[in-house]
Amino acid sequence: MGNMIVLVLLGVLALVVGGCGCVVWAERGGPRWVRAMATMTLAAGEVVRRSERNRRRDLNGTISDDG
């Protein structure tokens, strides 16, 4: 079980590092597939940022579903 968790975390780390590399390469005018990967990486980062922001708001109690 522990080895599987380490492998999953290494896979996630490889995806993050690869995505960051694509963003840098795309800024320097890389091929089309690199620009596509960079766009997906930046979009995923934005999703994570927004979900974290919403989670913090929910924890602070500033948003209510009561209406």
Image (cartoon, rainbow, N blue to C red):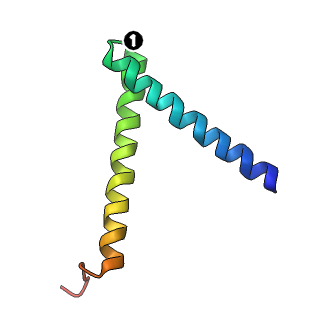
Q: Nearer the viewer, residue 21 or 41?
A: 21
Q: Quadrant of residue 28?
A: top left
Q: Residue 23 location in percent, x, y?
A: 38, 26
> Extreme left residue here?
67
Residue at 24% in and 79% down: 62
Q: Nearer the viewer, residue 37 or 57?
A: 57
Quarter of the picture containing the C terminus is bottom left
Q: Is residue 58 above or below residue 44?
A: below
Q: Quadrant of residue 10?
A: top right
Question: Label 1's element?
Answer: loop
**Local crowd size for mark 1, using a 10 Å CA cut-off: few (<14), some (14–19), many (≥20):** few
Q: Residue 20 location in percent, x, y?
A: 45, 30
Q: Is residue 35 above or below residue 39?
A: above
> Disc 1 marks which amino acid?
Pro
Q: Nearer the viewer, residue 33 or 63?
A: 63
Residue at 59% in and 39% down: 13
Q: Quadrant of residue 57?
A: bottom left
Answer left or right for 28 relative to 67.
right
Q: Residue 11 location in percent, x, y?
A: 64, 39
Label total for image: 1
Q: Is residue 9 above or below residue 40?
A: below
Residue at 38% in and 22% down: 24
Quarter of the picture containing the N terminus is bottom right
Residue at 37% in and 61% down: 52
Answer left or right for 61 relative to 37.
left
Q: Which residue is mark 1?
A: 31
Q: Residue 51 location in percent, x, y?
A: 36, 60
Answer left or right for 65 relative to 21.
left
Q: Is residue 50 above or below residue 30?
A: below
